[in-house]
Image: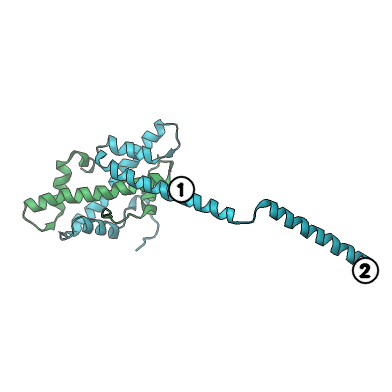
């Protein structure tokens, strides 16, 4: 069985975001593709991590504070603080 | 809903794409609007983070173009190593598609008439033209 596919991010937009960095000169199409996939995984991860806090609070709605908690607790998300 | 081109800094991943991803990840969960908004902005930050790091890695190598390997190294060094195996799967897909496309286009070129045959047809046409001109000159 093929793995569930996450919605694809629009590659043109990802590329535009990469190019918005003045230091970046060129990125290959494959590099943009890889970055888009990584970003999808990031969304999946942060959503799941945040949801843990909603569950702890016995809520069925994911709220902004759940994301804030996840960002604070998880080392890799420190860049978001 | 495309916005008119403004500041590059206003660029984000479209909300609809984020909503769809969240829905696929947490199927039966309601998500507050301000939480969605935060995820959109976090994505932008994530892309900037990884591409900056990849750019630095690229600069240190002799290459001028950020390659997928640079992005992978960036993910590793920034603590997102767990994403690497899935990301490599996608890269493999990429390369397979590119390879198929190259094979298909070279097969198409070969469907045409071989060069020797084209040359022969050209010689024949020239001969016909010469003959026609001779006829015309005699008629004048």
Name the residue rendered at 24%, 50% in the picture. A43
Q: Which residue is mark 1?
A: B99
Left/right placement of residue B41 relative to residue A71 reads: right
Discs 2, 1: same chain = yes
Name the residue rendered at 81%, 62% in the picture. B128
**Place of residue B66 in the rendered image (x, y in percent of width and height, measured from the top left):** 41, 40
State whether residue B73 is above or below residue A41. above
Judging from the image, what secondary structure is the residue with disc 2 in? helix
**Which of the image's four quarters has the C terminus of chain A?**
top left
Q: Nearer the viewer, residue A30 or B117?
A: B117
Colour in which chain A is drawn: green
**Place of residue B85 in the rendered image (x, y in percent of width and height, measured from the top left):** 29, 42
Subunit that carries the residue with mark 1 = B
State whether residue B67 is above or below residue B15. above
Which quadrant of the structure image shows residue A2? Answer: bottom left
Number of numbered discs on residues: 2
Q: Which mark is residue B139?
A: 2
Q: Nearer the viewer, residue B26 or A80?
A: B26
Judging from the image, what secondary structure is the residue with disc 1 in? helix
Q: Which chain is cyan?
A: B
Q: Farthest residue in the bottom direction? A: B139
**Which of the image's four quarters has the N terminus of chain A?**
bottom left
**Place of residue B38 in the rendered image (x, y in percent of width and height, measured from the top left):** 22, 52
Subunit that carries the residue with mark 2 = B
Which quadrant of the structure image shows residue A80? Answer: top left
- Measure the alpha-carbon separation of dots 2 and 1: 60 Å
Left/right placement of residue B25 relative to residue B115 reads: left
Disc 2 crowd rating (10 Å Cα; few below 14, some 14-19, many 20+) is few
Left/right placement of residue B8 relative to residue A1 reads: right
Q: Nearer the viewer, residue B16 or B134?
A: B134
């Amino acid at each position: 069985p093929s793995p569930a596919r996450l919605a694809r991010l629009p590659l043109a937009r990802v590329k535009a975001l990469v190019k918005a960095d003045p230091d970046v000169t060129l990125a290959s199409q494959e590099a943009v593709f890889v970055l888009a996939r990584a970003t999808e995984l990031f969304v999946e991860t942060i959503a799941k991590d945040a949801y843990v806090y909603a569950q702890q609070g016995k809520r069925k709605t994911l709220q902004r504070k759940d994301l804030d908690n996840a960002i604070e607790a998880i080392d890799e998300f420190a860049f978001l603080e | 809903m495309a916005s008119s081109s403004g500041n590059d800094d206003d660029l984000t991943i479209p909300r609809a794409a984020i909503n769809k991803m969240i829905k696929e990840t947490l199927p039966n969960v309601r998500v507050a609007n301000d939480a969605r908004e935060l995820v959109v902005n976090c994505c932008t930050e994530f892309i900037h983070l990884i591409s900056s790091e990849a750019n630095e890695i690229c600069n240190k190598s002799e290459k001028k173009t950020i390659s997928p390997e640079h992005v992978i190294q960036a993910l590793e060094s920034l603590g997102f190593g767990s994403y690497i195996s899935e990301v490599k799967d996608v890269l493999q897909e990429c390369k397979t598609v590119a390879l198929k496309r190259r094979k298909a286009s070279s097969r198409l070129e070969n469907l045409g008439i071989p060069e020797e045959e084209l040359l022969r047809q050209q010689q024949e046409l020239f001969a016909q033209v010469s003959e026609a001109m001779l006829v015309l000159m005699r008629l004048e």
